[in-house]
């Protein structure tokens, strides 16, 4: 039998660091309180009035090497928590039972809200005291009527799948192994939320294929969540979000031409600002799905391209971008996007996919 090889020498630790238990200075510790699991109150268990704006640095010195990563995540998580919080306040049990959904639906949404409050606490205390901790902005999620929760249920799938893409992408930017693991274990919870949504709310297969979409520029996926932030509503002391800003012209697609599924023609539009096309130059559309991408021709005159037929149908999502080099090997090769083509549930592609 080969000898056991221990991966790391472990020095004897004479004095244990004070363990974190119960409460930290920002609130209850995730994993050590039922509050982030099954608390059913209307107001969120965190920040629960303890944090209402940005927290300015309380120590001087250089920022921690991962501060910008956690600042990005705190800003994203304020948005996601606000999304669920708005649903908890607007809806009740009968909002969902009147759609024929299980009586447990509202309670599960409250639980997911609790998990997201726990994520906010986790990300918040990772930011070192030499950096600003972002505060919340004001948000508009586009659902306001208490008897009309379908739009919320569609956006939920978009938000959970986007979270998985940016958390997995940010793993590459984390410096410490502990942080990388933290991003993965939080991402796996978002996966569970989505699996629940797919079976419970949409009545479909909970599994979205062997791999979610791995996207190389997580800041761009974070950027997709800024559509929910009301213009000019963020505290002036908040750090820029997302940082760095890698925003490219936004894309949409014409839903009367096709519904954005594999094998279909697709006509892209550039609602804000159309890239400047050079005469005679080749352009391509890159479609990212699971851990691969496929490049196909794109005609800038008509906006036409084709969603690759090679992709499996009705699984997760596909990101589309317009590039001037096959495969989008670097950020400079990218001219527009990404556009989220939500595939599962298939009916949502044209509802949420066009945003
Ligand atoms: C749920 O909300 C609807 C719409 O606001 C309201 O009519 C209904 O009474 C509420 N039901 C319960 C059980 O609170
Ligand atoms: C950062 O600030 C918090 C709140 O004031 C404090 O509890 C914590 O000990 C500080 N962390 C460090 C490493 O100084
Ligand atoms: C917010 O600002 C953007 C960019 O300046 C603009 O395109 C958009 O119409 C504004 N939205 C609202 C609701 O004012
Ligand atoms: C596409 O795949 C190539 C080859 O694996 C990779 O280098 C590139 O970064 C990928 N592009 C995107 C946008 O995922």
Image (cartoon, rainbow, N blue to C red):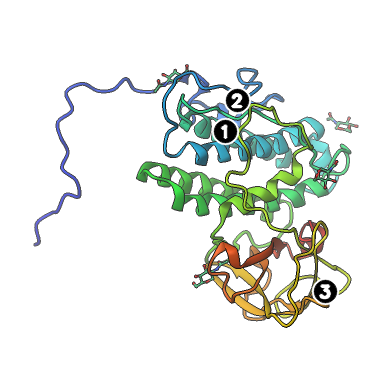
Query: What residue does disc 1 label?
Result: 120
User: Which element type, helix, strand or loop, lies under badge 3?
Assistant: loop
- Residue 5 x/y as whole percent: 14, 53
Callout 2: SS? loop
The percent position of residue 8, horizontal first and vertical second, equals 19, 46
Q: Residue at x 62, y 53 (%)?
A: 246
Q: Do callouts 2 and 3 mark residues in contact (Cβ within 8 Å)?
A: no
Q: Quadrant of the N terminus?
A: bottom left
Label placed on residue 309: none
- Residue at image coords 64%, 73%: 324
The residue identified by callout 3 is: 258
Badges 1 and 2: C-beta atoms under 8 Å apart? yes
Residue 207: quarter of image:
bottom right
| Residue topped by disc 2 | 46
User: Which percent across, then down, holds residue 9?
Assistant: 15, 42
Q: Earlier in the sequence, mark 2 or mark 3?
A: 2
């Amino acid at each position: 039998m080969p000898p056991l090889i221990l991966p790391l020498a472990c020095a004897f630790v004479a004095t244990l660091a004070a363990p974190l238990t119960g409460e930290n200075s920002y609130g209850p510790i995730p994993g050590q309180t039922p509050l982030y699991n099954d608390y059913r109150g209307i107001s969120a268990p965190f920040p629960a009035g303890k944090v209402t704006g940005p927290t300015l640095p309380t120590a001087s010195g250089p920022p921690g090497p991962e501060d910008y990563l956690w600042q990005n995540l705190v800003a994203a998580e304020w948005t996601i928590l606000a999304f669920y919080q708005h649903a908890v306040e607007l809806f009740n049990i009968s909002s969902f039972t009147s759609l024929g959904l299980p009586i447990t639906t509202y309670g599960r949404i409250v639980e997911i809200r609790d998990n997201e409050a726990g994520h906010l606490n986790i990300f918040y205390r990772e930011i070192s005291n030499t950096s600003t901790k972002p505060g919340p902005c004001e948000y508009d999620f586009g659902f306001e009527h208490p008897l009309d929760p379908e739009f919320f249920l569609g956006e939920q799938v978009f938000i959970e799948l986007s979270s998985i893409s940016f958390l997995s992408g940010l793993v590459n930017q984390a410096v410490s192994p502990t942080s990388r693991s933290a991003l993965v274990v939080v991402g796996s919870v978002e996966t569970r939320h989505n699996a629940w949504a797919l079976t419970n709310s949409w009545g479909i297969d909970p599994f979205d294929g062997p791999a979610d979409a791995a996207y190389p520029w997580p800041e761009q996926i974070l950027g997709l969540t800024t559509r929910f932030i009301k213009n000019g509503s963020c505290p002036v002391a908040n750090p820029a979000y997302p940082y760095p800003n890698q925003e490219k012209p936004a894309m949409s697609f014409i839903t009367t031409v096709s519904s954005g599924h594999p094998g279909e023609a697709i006509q892209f539009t550039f609602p804000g600002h159309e890239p400047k096309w050079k005469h005679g130059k080749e352009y391509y559309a890159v479609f990212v799905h699971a851990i691969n991408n496929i490049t196909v021709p794109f005609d800038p005159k008509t906006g036409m391209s084709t969603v690759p037929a090679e992709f499996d149908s009705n699984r997760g999502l596909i990101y589309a971008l317009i590039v001037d080099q096959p495969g989008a090997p670097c950020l400079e090769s990218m001219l527009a996007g990404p556009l989220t083509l939500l595939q599962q549930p298939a009916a949502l592609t044209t509802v949420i996919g066009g945003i």
